[in-house]
Amino acid sequence: YGAYSVVETKAPEGYVLDQEPLAVKVERDGVTVDLGDVVNNAEPQPPVPDEQEPPVPTEPEQPPVPEQPQPPVKVTPNKPKLAMTGNETAPALLSGGALALLAGATLVAAARRRKDA
């Protein structure tokens, strides 16, 4: 029990440390704290200049070199292209059809040989 002083030892980031002691009283019924109005003061920020003056050139500026004219680019309108449906499967279908004809001809020839024999 008794009267104590509380002193801030570390301020939050961006705030000024308050080194003024604050009174705290501890009694039998509990703790009585009357801190009054405590104000956290932010750290002062350096002023930001509104407008920076341009640096003064030490050498005269050279005039820009004119660009060489470019030849005109010929633009042709895009012609629509037809869809290429079935183009990739045509060789496979032709090969499969040729094999089927060859197999059929072989079977017909074999059947005639058996019949003649």
Image (tube, rainbow, N blue to C red):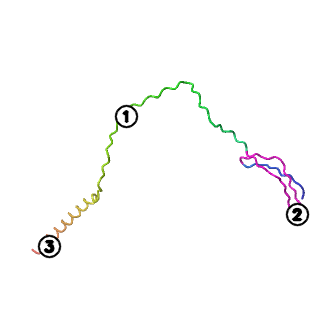
Q: Is residue 107 above or below residue 91?
A: below
| 45 horizontally vs 102: left or right | right
Task: Choose the circle earlier in sequence order: 3 or 1.
Answer: 1
Quarter that holds the C terminus: bottom left
The span shown in magenta is 13-42
Question: In front: mark 3 or mark 2?
Answer: 2
Label 1 crowding class (10 Å Cα cut-off): few <14, some 14-19, many 20+?
few
| 22 horizontally vs 117: left or right | right
Task: Choose the circle earlier in sequence order: 3 or 2.
Answer: 2
Label 1 sits on a secondary structure element that is: loop
Label 3 sits on a secondary structure element that is: helix
Q: Which residue is mark 2?
A: 29
Rounded to the nearest angstrom, the CA distance separating label 3 from label 1 is 78 Å
The residue that appears at 32% across and 40% down in the rendered structure is 74
Q: Nearer the viewer, residue 5 or 66?
A: 66
Q: Is residue 103 above or below residue 76?
A: below
Q: Amino acid at mark 1?
A: Gln
Task: Choose the circle earlier in sequence order: 2 or 1.
Answer: 2
Q: Amino acid at mark 3?
A: Ala
Q: Is residue 69 above or below residue 75?
A: above
Rounded to the nearest angstrom, the CA distance separating label 3 from label 2 is 119 Å
Label 3 crowding class (10 Å Cα cut-off): few <14, some 14-19, many 20+?
few
Q: Which residue is mark 3?
A: 111
Q: Amino acid at mark 2?
A: Asp
Q: Which residue is mark 1?
A: 70
